[in-house]
Image (cartoon, rainbow, N blue to C red):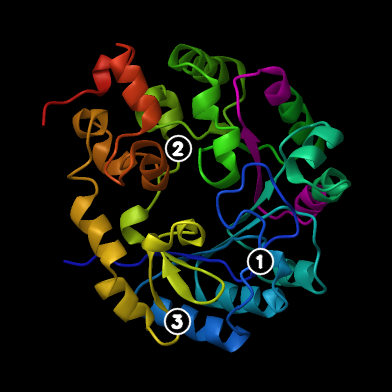
Amino acid sequence: MIPTPGVLYINPAGGCNLHCKHCWVNEGSFTGETLALEQWKELLTQAKVMGCEYVKLTGGEPLLYDDIVPLYRFAADSFPKVTIETNGTLQPDGFWDALVERKPFHISVSIDSAEADVHDKFRGQTGAWKKTVAFAEKLVDYKINNQVIMCVSDTQRKPIKDMINLIQSIGAYTLKINFITPSGRGKYNSFFDNTSIEETLDFFAWIDKETPAWVLPSVPAALLPVNRLKSLGYCAVRNLMGVLPDGTFSLCGIAFSRKEMAWGKFPETSVQEAWENSPVYKMIRASVPDNLEGICRKCIHRDTCIGSCVVNNMETGGTITSPDILCQRAYDAGLFPKTRLIDR
């Protein structure tokens, strides 16, 4: 039985206005061709008919799309959950009015340092930090559910502590910590290449014990204490469909750089045809989670965690069924928690 495409990631803009050091999507470049507003509306309508309930507007930078306001309004009127991921440097005309009238499920804003110059250097644009912090403050003022996303490449504690203080001053009170992956430009500053597994596990333990519960590290389930599992998000990879700016169907945004992870193009290919016939989606359904390799096969979280991120596993291990790199390193070092193992 084919699962429902319950989650739709759409990348409406053909690029980004920043040049971030970690970008794994289109690495700050512009694709050129983008779908027209009416085409996006038709795509969303087809996805809704198939049972989709969650839409994420992401990128690139989604607020670069000329018709982002009417596109957001249409999505918010059609789906119970709509989220936006943005670098927070842009405020299109009518955007805030649309958010107030139709509250999103939440908006994620990227802030990588409490220090303006550090953030600006990471994002490749002077003045970006000031704009993004103002954007985050405005989300709080308008009482819009929000979170700050911080990307890190090592286990330094002070930047985390400083970011917590900044978020408290803004009033956001939700911090998601993403670890830079060896994809795109991130391969030059990957968290996984900069830290040993011992350092990594000690860092995770510090986050658990010394930071507030609203600090949410992107840690695989097996390496988190039980008390933090309730706030852990899982990738809906078996129910996930991504669409690039030109209508190309992708697993998520990975087909910007991994062309083999794309198949079909809207409107020539319908949403239903792509979902049912794409070799990419078929491969995911046939392989995940049952054929996950290494420690992921033995983990009690296999069927929910699903390898944490199959795209990252493909980059670090070669295939979508490769095990999560952190869990495998912990297992190989004899540090994987025995309470999370099961015979299969």
Q: Quadrant of residue 297?
A: top left
Q: Amino acid at mark 1?
A: Phe
Q: Residue at x 60, y 44 (%)?
A: 185
The vertical placement of 100 against 291, above or below, is: below
Q: Amino acid at mark 2?
A: Leu
Q: Residue at x 54, y 86 (%)?
A: 39
Disc 3 crowd, CA 10 A, few/some/many (<14, 14-19, 20+) = many
What is the C-alpha distance between the residues marked 1 and 2? 33 Å
Q: Which residue was labeled with disc 2?
A: 232
Q: Residue at x 24, y 58 (%)?
A: 283
Q: Position of residue 191 (x, y in %)?
A: 54, 29
Q: Earlier in the sequence, mark 2 or mark 3?
A: 2
SS for callout 2: loop
Q: Which residue was labeled with disc 3?
A: 266
Disc assigned to residue 30: 1
Instruction: Please name which of the two marks, 1 or 3, marks the residue nearer to the observer.
Output: 1
Q: Is residue 153 left or right of residue 282?
A: right
Q: State whether residue 180 appears in this view.
A: no
